[in-house]
Amino acid sequence: MTHPLESRLALYAGKDLSLPSRFRIALHLRGCSRCRRVVKEFQGLRQLAGSCAQELPPGVNWDVLAAEMKANIRLGLAAARCITATVVEPESPKARWRAPAIVLPVLLLIVAGWILQSLNPPLRPAGPEFVVEVSSAGIGVQRDGRGFTLLQPHTENVVYSVRGEAAGARYVDEETGQVTISHVYAY
Amino acid sequence: MLTSRERAVLLLRDVEGLPAEEVARYLKCSKATVRSHIANARVKFRRYMMRRKS
């Protein structure tokens, strides 16, 4: 009797053979107890391999391993905290220009306002005690009994105008044709 | 002693229970090569166990 090769029996035990090969070996196994025993051994070894893989290796100090694993985990967490604490996101070019783009127009606006204000001082309303009056002599401003009068030439060509706390006078010199405009503000 | 290839095939086929086609795909080899490796690995494993018994 010719026995199949040991490797063929090993493959048969793991059902790794093609159907015809399996059939041929199955026929042989019916009449060969020796090969049946070998196949059984292979099948047992397969199960043994599976159970051996689940077992933990002997002679290992698991407490030390567990302590090392905990230490590694703590080290990893600490490293992660360090990284997150020191990482600074790179400033984008847009963000770099954002602050000057906001501050500069505001600054220009403030400077322009200051310049305009210094050039044209705002008219402050006169207090109730100021009195602006126009008479034939000129424009007078009085306060608490004191005041002054901007004298106008004695001509009939003077045109007076009063608006709020301001009064104006305008006349044309008949000889020279010169126009003189005077404004008096009371504030 | 099993070669690294035989050990890998033995683990994938007999321990993990993967089919031969999948083992061949993992190891990027043909199914016939997987069969050859698994046969050698099982034979070596059996001989090793027999030596241990004796």
Image: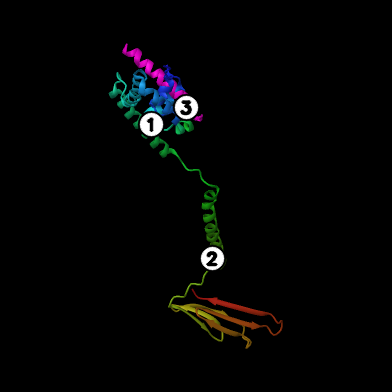
Q: Which residues are magenta?
A: B28-54
Q: Chain letter of disc 1?
A: B
The answer as to whether the residues below labels 2 and 3 share one chain is no
Query: Could you tell me which secondary element the residue under label 3 belongs to?
Result: helix
Asked if labels 1 and 3 share a chain, the reply is yes
> How busy is the neighbourhood of tag 3: few (under 14 within 10 Å), some, or many (20 plus)?
many
B27 in the magenta segment: no
Within 10 Å of disc 1 (Cα), the crowding (few <14, some 14-19, many 20+) is some
Q: Residues within 10 Å of mark 2 (few under 14, many from 20)?
A: few
Q: Is residue A15 above or below residue A118?
A: above
Same-chain check, marks 2 and 1: no
Residue A130 percent across, percent down from the top left: 46, 77
Tell me which residue sits at (54%, 65%) in the image: A117
Residue B17 numbered tag: 1
The front one of A21 and A67 is A21
Q: CA distance from mark 1 to mark 3?
A: 14 Å
The residue that mark 3 highlights is B34
